[in-house]
Image (cartoon, rainbow, N blue to C red):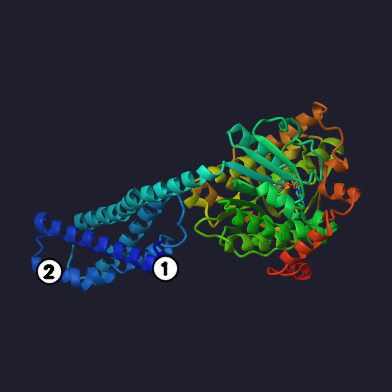
């Protein structure tokens, strides 16, 4: 097997090729000047002098601007059309810089037609070389990947294992996968019952495994022959984790580590993990996947530590992808009324009053059907575009302040009274969703307004009687149900073994507490 080229060397080669292309563009435009520009006439010697003393040293600006534009780093895995647009933009900026500085520095007065000619050649070279590379290597890589997949699929079927598939989001992910013809195996301990998946259970391509993701036997059994895993099982939300933090730590973190190891051992190729935009914590700036993370709760800490475990496990044959979900809203078989848009809408309908804590704080929102669509699109995306990547999942148009959400509710439920209260909650984040749009092609189809309208409709139709029922809230349900202890003594030991590494429960709790102070 050939050894991969080190990343630094690959970047150096790409920079050198770009530099060479700029030289070719420069020489071609100077030859054009010598041959065709009559007025003012430029002597050959003058052109050579200009090339060696002005153009050549200044052209180092190109690799510099290209690296600032992320052409050698950030754009890895992005769609070709986006890469080409960025290359054209970077080449134009670098050309402007070169022409401007050369105008100030050079004695040779080059006609504008030559500068224009150089700009066209430079942009064409930056775009053309990338397009050519994609044509030559991408098709070869796709072919190699297709051969690997077809070789593997001769030994296994195309089963997708959805862990936590009976939940608010999971039930819709499973429904969409079945609609698209996947064979689905669903592992869930049915913490909130089976109402969400009851209509799907008779589907011929669905296999339901009632089990706990902390139980090694349940996981090994469910993983058998699975080509991909979508891991959604968790104790979800800050209050629910605070209610039972030991079990939340096991389920959200230690079990994820075990799932990763078993998936790798099983030869599973893809692993999509549901994380959360809450890992960003509090910030005034727009957060993208490279932004600093400041988890402010145990829930966010367990998500962040699981992300690390997963991404470190990436290899040539194991392709993990982390999806950081925005805050979800909208109707599902078990609608959750512990999520902000759903809860405020239900309160407006049933109580007539909503209380907004810290109305100027930003949150990213996304409809539950859109998030399920994003998961399915990520699974179907070319593996090169998603392997080892983190994606924020949401839509730039759905970054809203809590005050804006309240106003949108009042538009549809006009008798709503809104009370604004300030408290110490520091969670505040606005998130960029450009990467998933460019790499996977995902954009949301539903707005917050449509989510509010469908909930109002569900109340009017009598589908929902009382949002206060504990069934609709993870934390209330867990309070009533009691702790989610593992099934056996062995599970406790296995979870303790997987709990090391990223930090013990006590360390994560302390870290989250110190960030939120
Ligand atoms: N809903 C949101 O706003 C949101 C936002 C960001 C991230 N997420 C993430 O998306 C995922 C799904 O969230 P959701 O809203 O559907 O939550 P949910 O609580 O409705 O679903 C979680 C599912 O996991 C199952 N589960 C819990 N413990 C288990 C265990 N030990 N073994 C097997 N199954 C177990 C539950 O029975 C449930 O079906 C979670 O990982 C969550 O952290 C959700």
State the image coordinates of residue 105 (x, y, percent, origin top left): 25, 72
Q: Residue at x 79, y 64 (%)?
A: 493
State the image coordinates of residue 194 (x, y, percent, origin top left): 79, 38
Q: Report the residue marked by disc 1.
A: 6
- Which sits earlier in the primary sequence, circle 2 or circle 1? 1
State the image coordinates of residue 207 (x, y, percent, origin top left): 69, 38
Residue 423 visible in this rendered orientation of the protein: no
Left or right: residue 204 versus residue 45 is: right
- Give the farthest residue toward the front: 155
How far is the residue under mark 2 from the one under mark 1?
Answer: 42 Å
Left or right: residue 483 versus residue 453 is: right
Quadrant in the picture for residue 182: top right
Residue 54 visible in this rendered orientation of the protein: yes
Q: Report the residue marked by disc 2.
A: 46
State the image coordinates of residue 163 (x, y, percent, origin top left): 69, 47
Q: Residue at x 41, y 64 (%)?
A: 4
Q: Residue at x 61, y 57 (%)?
A: 265
Q: Residues within 10 Å of mark 1 (few under 14, many from 20)?
A: few
- Give the farthest residue toward the top: 461
Looking at the rendered structure, the secondary structure element under dot 1 is loop
| 437 vs 223, nearest the viewer | 223
Relative to 87, does residue 104 appear above or below in the rendering?
Answer: below
Relative to 310, does residue 80 appear above or below in the rendering?
Answer: above
Q: Residues within 10 Å of mark 2 (few under 14, many from 20)?
A: few
Q: Quadrant of the N terminus?
A: bottom left
């Amino acid at each position: 097997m050939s050894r991969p080229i080190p990343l630094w060397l690959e970047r150096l080669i790409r920079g050198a090729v770009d530099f060479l292309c700029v030289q070719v563009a420069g020489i071609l435009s100077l030859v054009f000047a010598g041959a065709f520009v009559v007025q003012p006439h430029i002597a050959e010697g003058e052109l050579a002098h200009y090339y060696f003393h002005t153009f050549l040293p200044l052209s180092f600006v190109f690799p510099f601007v290209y690296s600032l534009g992320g052409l050698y780093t950030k754009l890895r895995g992005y769609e070709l059309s986006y890469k080409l647009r960025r290359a054209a933009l970077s080449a134009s900026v670098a050309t402007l810089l070169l022409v401007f500085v050369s105008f100030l520095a050079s004695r040779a007065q080059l006609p504008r037609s030559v500068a224009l000619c150089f700009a066209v050649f430079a942009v064409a070279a930056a775009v053309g070389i990338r397009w050519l590379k994609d044509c030559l290597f991408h098709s070869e890589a796709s072919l190699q990947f297709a051969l690997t997949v077809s070789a593997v699929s001769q030994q296994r079927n195309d089963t997708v294992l959805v862990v936590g598939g009976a939940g608010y989001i999971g039930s819709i992910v499973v429904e969409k996968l079945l609609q698209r013809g996947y064979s689905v195996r669903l592992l869930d301990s049915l913490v909130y019952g089976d109402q969400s998946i009851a209509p799907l259970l008779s589907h011929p391509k669905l296999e339901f495994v009632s089990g706990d993701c902390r139980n090694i036997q349940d996981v090994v059994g469910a993983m058998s022959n699975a080509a991909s895993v979508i891991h959604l099982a968790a104790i979800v939300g800050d209050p629910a984790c605070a209610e039972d933090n030991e079990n939340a730590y096991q389920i959200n973190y230690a079990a994820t580590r075990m799932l990763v190891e078993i998936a790798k051992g099983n030869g599973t190729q893809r692993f999509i993990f549901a994380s959360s935009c809450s890992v960003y914590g509090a910030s005034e700036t727009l957060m993208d996947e490279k932004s600093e993370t400041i988890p402010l709760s145990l829930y966010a800490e367990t998500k962040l530590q699981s992300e690390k475990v997963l991404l470190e496990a990436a290899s040539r044959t194991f392709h993990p992808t982390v999806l950081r979900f925005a805050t979800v809203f909208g109707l599902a078989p078990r609608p959750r009324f512990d999520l902000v848009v759903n809860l405020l809408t239900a309160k407006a309908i049933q109580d007539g009053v909503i209380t907004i804590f810290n109305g100027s704080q930003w949150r990213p929102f996304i409809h539950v059907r859109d998030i399920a669509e994003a998961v399915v699109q990520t699974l179907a995306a070319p593996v090169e575009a998603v392997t080892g990547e983190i994606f924020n999942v949401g839509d730039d148009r759905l970054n809203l302040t809590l005050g804006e959400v309240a106003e949108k509710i009042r538009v549809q439920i006009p008798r709503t009274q809104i009370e604004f209260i300030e408290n110490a909650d520091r969670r505040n984040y606005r998130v960029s969703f450009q990467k998933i749009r460019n790499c996977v092609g995902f954009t949301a189809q539903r707005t917050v307004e449509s989510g509010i309208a469908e909930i109002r409709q569900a109340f009017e139709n009598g589908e929902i009687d009382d949002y206060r029922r504990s069934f609709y809230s993870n934390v209330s349900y867990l309070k009533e149900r009691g702790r989610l202890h593992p099934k056996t003594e062995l599970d406790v030991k296995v979870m303790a073994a997987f709990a090391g590494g990223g930090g013990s429960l006590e360390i994560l709790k302390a870290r989250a507490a110190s960030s939120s102070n």
